[in-house]
Image (cartoon, helix red, strand yellow):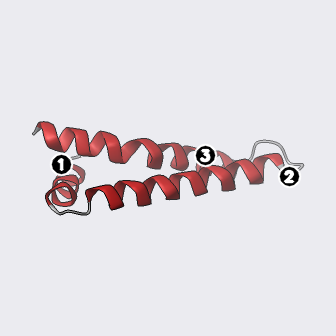
Amino acid sequence: MEEALEAAELVADSELEGAFTWLLRLLGVLFLLAGLGMWLLTDAGLLVLPALLLLVGVVLLVAPSVLLFLAELT
């Protein structure tokens, strides 16, 4: 966790904070769409890969905001 906070502090100190968060959010949306597409457009039901893609997508949407907020608190 300490390494993630240090990386978030490095990004927060640089002037790329906004671009970094939006890039991660865009990747999160792409992962969500890929997971939903695989889950809804296949006949196999809930598979492990679509579930992992959905989980990673949600984490990528939420994690940048949380990490940058924690970096600002320290």
- First in sequence, mark 2 or 3: give its number: 2
Label 2: element kind? loop
Residue 35: x, y in percent?
Answer: 68, 51
CA distance separating discs 2 and 3:
15 Å
Q: Which of disc 3 and disc 1 is earlier in sequence?
A: 1
Nearer-N-terminus badge (2/1): 1
Query: Relative to the observer, which residue lies in front, 22 or 42?
Result: 22
The local secondary structure at tag 3 comes to helix
Dot in front, 1 or 3: 3
Does 15 appear above or below 65?
Answer: below
Q: Nearer the viewer, residue 63 or 14?
A: 14
What residue is drawn where x is 83% and y is 43%?
Answer: 45
Q: The C terminus appears in which quarter of the rendering?
A: top left
Q: Name the residue under label 3.
A: 54
Q: Residue 71 location in percent, x, y?
A: 17, 44
What's under tag 3, amino acid-wise?
Leu
* Residue sitting at x 18%, y 48%: 2
> Residue 4: image x %, image y %?
24, 52
Secondary structure under tag 1 reads helix
The residues tagged by marks 1 and 3 sit, at their Cα atoms, a distance apart of 26 Å
**Residue at the outermost right position:** 43
Rendering quarter of residue 30? bottom right
Please state the horizontal and vertical placement of residue 48, each as a whole percent of the image: 68, 48
What amino acid type should be assigned to the residue bearing mark 1? Glu
> What residue would you read off at disc 2?
42
Which residue is located at x 54 percent, y 49 percent?
57
Q: How crowded is mark 2: few (under 14 residues within 10 Å), some or many (20 or more)?
A: few
Tag 1 near tag 3, CB within 8 Å: no
Q: Mark 1 points at which residue?
A: 2
